[in-house]
Image (cartoon, rainbow, N blue to C red):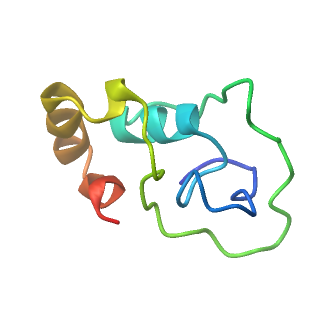
Amino acid sequence: PDCPFAVTDSGAYGGFCCKRCHVTYIRGEPAVHGEKCSKVPNGDLPRARPSPPTDPLAESTSQKAKQLAWKAGRSDAFQA
């Protein structure tokens, strides 16, 4: 994902810092963060694989979201 924050320690958000970041990644938009994002800087760590959160937001699992992800070349965000 193209965001400056680290993946959460719990792994609940997959390869993302928060669920909102996952949604914007799927849409091919610049990263936006939700209120539950810890906003911990990533530093020099390598980027995480963009795996989806364990319980993604509904707007990131709709058919339209999947079409946007395929169009943006980001279908990897649906593979666990």
Q: Nearer the viewer, residue 74 or 40?
A: 40
Q: Position of residue 7 (x, y in %)?
A: 69, 59
* Quarter of the picture holding the C terminus: bottom left
- How many marks can you see? 0
Q: Residue at x 55, y 60 (%)?
A: 15
Vertical placement of residue 68 versus 49, above or below: above
Q: Position of residue 18 (x, y in %)?
A: 63, 41
Q: Position of residue 17 (x, y in %)?
A: 67, 48
Q: Position of residue 34 (x, y in %)?
A: 67, 26
Q: Residue at x 62, y 62 (%)?
A: 11
Is 29 left or right of 68, judged from the image as shown? right
Q: Nearer the viewer, residue 10 or 6?
A: 10
Q: Residue at x 36, y 40 (%)?
A: 26
Is 27 left or right of 72, judged from the image as shown? right
Q: Quadrant of residue 12?
A: bottom right
Is 38 left or right of 20, judged from the image as shown? right
Q: Residue at x 44, y 43 (%)?
A: 55
